[in-house]
Amino acid sequence: MSIVQLRNIWKIFGPTPQHVLKNISPQASRAEIQAETGHVVAVRDVSLDIAEGEIFVVMGLSGSGKSTLIRCLSRLIEPTGGDVIINGQNVTEMNETDLRDLRRNTVSMVFQRFGLFPHRRVIDNVAYGLEVRGVDAAERYAHCAEILKLVDLQDWGNHYPHELSGGMQQRVGLARALAVDPQIMLCDEPFSALDPLIRRDMQNELLHLQKTLKKTMIFITHDFLEALKLGDRIAIMKDGVVVQVGTPQQIVANPADAYVREFIQDVPRSRVLTAETIMGPANAATATDQSIPAHTTLEELIPLVAPTDAALPVVNGNGEVVGAVDRAAVLQALAAA
Amino acid sequence: MTSLKSRSYWLLSLGLVVLLFVVAQQLPQLQLFPEDWNLGWREPINDFKRWVVINRTTHWLFLLIFEPLSAVLDFVIRFVEDVLLWLPWPIIVLGFFLSANKISGLRLALLVTACLVLMGLFGLWKESMQTLALMSISVIVSLLIGVPLGIWAAQNDRVDAILRPILDAMQTVPIFVYLIPVLLFFGVARVPSAIATIVYALPPAIRLTNLGIRGVSADLLEAADAFGSTARQRMRKVQIPVAMPSILTGVNQTIMMALSIVVLAALIGSGGLGDVVLKSLRRLRVGSALEAGLAIVVMAILLDRFSAALGQRSIQFSQPQFQGFRLFPASWQANGFAQRIEGAIDALYVRSGNLNAWIKSRLPERFRSDWASMLLVCAVVAIPLLLLGIDNFPRDWNIGISKPVDNLVEWMRVNLYNIGDSGIGTGPFRDFLIVQIFLPLTNFLTNVVPWTVIVLIATVLAFRTGNWKLTIGVVLMLVFVGLLGMWGFAMDTLGQTLIAVVLCILLGIPLGIWASRNDTVDQLLRPVLDLLQTIPIFVYLVPVIMLFGTGSVAGLIASLVYSIAPVVRLTNLGIRKVDETVKESATAFGSTGWQRLIKVEVPLALPEIMLGINQTTMMVLAMVIIAGLVGATGLGLEVIQGFANDNLGRSVEAGLAMVMLAMVIDRIAQAWADKAAEAANLKA
Ligand SMILES: Nc1ncnc2c1ncn2[C@@H]1O[C@H](COP(=O)(O)OP(=O)(O)O)[C@@H](O)[C@H]1O
Ligand SMILES: [Mg+2]
């Protein structure tokens, strides 16, 4: 059962979006619609299912509608059409109070430019969500001190945000989102404003946290490598439309169109693709003395298939044979760019 | 309109002006504003005033609204005043010292102390406390009204749209005009002065609160929303705190506005320092007027620095750490004596910090704060002083400067006014200005130039900016001046304004350019200009009268000094802002310094310069009316004489004409400044 379902979400910016939505022709491109009506179709008929506990990455060039889409989820931006269903409840139909409760308890957010409150100490920034929820001071400080430990900022609670480095500030942003113990976290390019080295640390830290926290995260990025590293699944957006959804391996192995192929060009395929993505049918397996785990990357696979002409069996976590790979399959996968 | 080539537009306009000029010679209607067009508002207004006077004690409007309001305000002001006068003066000084120290540090604390002691030494302690009471209450009420209104306007675009033009108009309206309705409904006393002050000081509080809250970045609002804040929580926990520096700037400006009309408020019975200035001026006792004027300046400095420090503190977001106090310049470091004094101050400071910590630790948990401990210290010190019967600053500590100043004035009157009967001196200089410049110009504007030509010129200037509404507004406002029967006086005022503005430009722009070239000049000029803007308008009049006697020339010179700051400041700023690479490329093409200035820097700085001229003009206008108090002719004098002769209608007419004139000039100048800014943006 997916925790978040988006059903035909549209967002059109302009003076009369409903009118434009009604008369839109399916073939017209975003540029044509803008030229004709003066409206921007930021999100176009997007339907997605996001499973509990996964990191779902939304990837696309700047302007492709990622930020708009993610904001439709908790209605920070009101969708023009479609339904958002979270935990089986239709968010689009919620009244103001229910919506506020959703934002206070279920969905929290991390921002690209951090969005920290400059007049509040770090601890009060982290405690903001609990404070508006009405949790009393002693309890929220105790809880937030724990959260600060989690992001390694236990000594910085009494400082003001401007006294922290960029990476530390975003850790505060992360802590603030975690402090309300949300089911779902929305992250809008949280690491894009950081230096590459810091960014890598933060990605690792996020993965580390996720191992124990198991939140459902919807993570936006325009950096495909980041998407590969973090995403359990990736949706690729272009001009407001989701052009492909899949696991990193699926996308690298079978890019849906030229736009997606552009992204994967610089991807080290041998490190992303696994035995599972390139394997042939199980009955083709000829070797019996050796088997390969399904998530073995091509890089690891090469020394195994190089010395033999046989097709090696691929086994899943339960030891069942699910497919087979041989040298030819590996070489083909490496070549197809 | 903009399609017309610039040159042909001006040629055509010139042709029209000349044509109208010639035609008007034949048609008296076009020459002098026809007297029988007068709206005749004067008598009805005076009748209304008589009605108000008669019905003040009986009509429900007064009994139910004005009187209770009056009574409450009066009670509060009187109460604060009584408390300030009852408290021993050392306690007031101590209280200010401790809070200044808490807010900003020892430096501010010492400054504040010096200011207060100076007021006492001038023998003006009582008057100062009266003024302080009236000011504080007025400012507090202004803020109580202004800040919520600002918050409302920030949340509601319609409220904003309604308030904005009103606030704009309020800033264009000369101070005097506020006094008229207040006088009408509340008579002469403390309360009407307070109300005039409240209304006058209101705009910056509203404007800066609104601005600050609207300026809170969308990112922060989104973050607040994303965590499920209610609109109220968002306002209280995010918008207001983030806007606090701006709001406190508004508080600071509100205080300064309030102080700038202390003397005028005395015209309707505020008492206090303003009253001393006014009475001394009337009796031509320059010495005591100067003393009281200085006391006002000192109070302005005190409150300005105090509230500015509050604003500073709100953006620091961290407690200042004590790092030792520097009383003397760094170059004295080697001097053993200086070191010892500074060391002693440091030690004393640390001791008292420890004492404070000790007191705090004894306080019950709920009240444990620096402020509570300060209050306690004050109270403890107060008891013996009260028992000793100490209240006001001792009279005999007076080191007043009125005697020497009066002597100086006398000396100047004898020696500078007309040096050795040679025809050289301030007296002949004044006569020369009046006979050779003022009178001819006024005569020219009033009698030679037909009123229709003036209207036409204004129209041409307004129309060139391509703004239809502005053009129509300008024509209507000017005609209205005529209809009020104030055309002649308005032209007199216009003439003086023009002279003052031209002088400001001639002196100010070169000064600004110089300051932009030379950092030393800039640094010397900056505090002087700051001071000029901090000093209440009135105080300028005092020394000028010393030299030139009363009349239009005194008014002119006072306006000059008062109004020159913006031109200098903004010219300097504008030129300094010109992009380095642009300057470099001008130099690379072999421009001389002068060519670079004229061809590149000044044109690029034009928007700022225009803005400066605009601000200066408005300040001149504000001053011209006050100059009426020292006998400068024109609308200002009309207003004053209306007051003096119990002819409110006359004051209202002149006041309205003043507003119209100010608006016409302001709006045209503003439109031109906008255009210049636009052009500069296009070029950039
Ligand atoms: N408030 C708005 N009004 C009009 N257009 C907008 C607004 N917000 C976003 N857009 C447009 O919608 C498109 C998608 O924007 P966005 O969701 O921010 O893209 P991304 O986050 O992928 O860079 C862009 O073309 C942007 O210009
Ligand atoms: Mg974005």
Image (spheres, grey):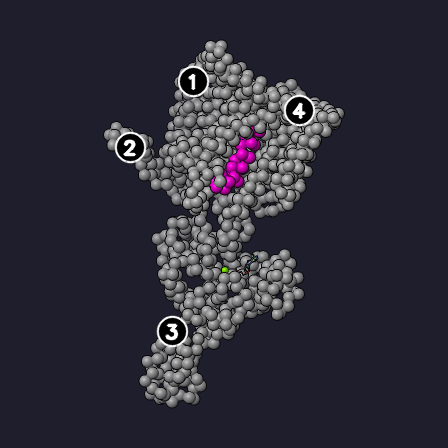
Marks 2/1: CA distance?
34 Å
Q: Kindly tell me whether mark 4's CB lies below 8 Å from ligand 1.
A: no
Q: Residue B107, percent across and down?
A: 37, 33
N-terminal of the pair, mark 2 or mark 4, is 2
For the residue labelled by badge 2, is the local secondary structure a helix, a strand or a loop? helix
Marks 1/4: CA distance?
51 Å
Q: Which residue occupies 57% across, 19% down?
A: B436
Determine which residue is flagged by label 4. Answer: B448
Main secondary structure found in the magenta portion? helix
Viewer-proximal residue, B671 or B461?
B461
Q: Residue B645, percent across and down?
A: 65, 18
Confirm or deny contact between disc 2 and disc 3 (CB under 8 A).
no
Output the chain of dot 1.
B
Determine which residue is flagged by label 3. Answer: A271
- The quarter of the picture where the N terminus of chain B appears is top right
Q: What's the magenta region? A: B600-622
Determine which residue is flagged by label 1. Answer: B400
Q: Which residue occupies 49% across, 64% down?
A: A61
**Left or right placement of residue A54 versus residue B151 in this view:** left
The residue mark sitting in front, 2 or 4, is 4
For the residue labelled by badge 3, is the local secondary structure a helix, a strand or a loop? helix
Q: Residue B557, percent across and down?
A: 52, 23
The residue mark sitting in front, 3 or 1, is 3
Marks 3/1: CA distance?
89 Å
Q: Quadrant of residue A22?
A: bottom right
N-terminal of the pair, mark 1 or mark 4, is 1
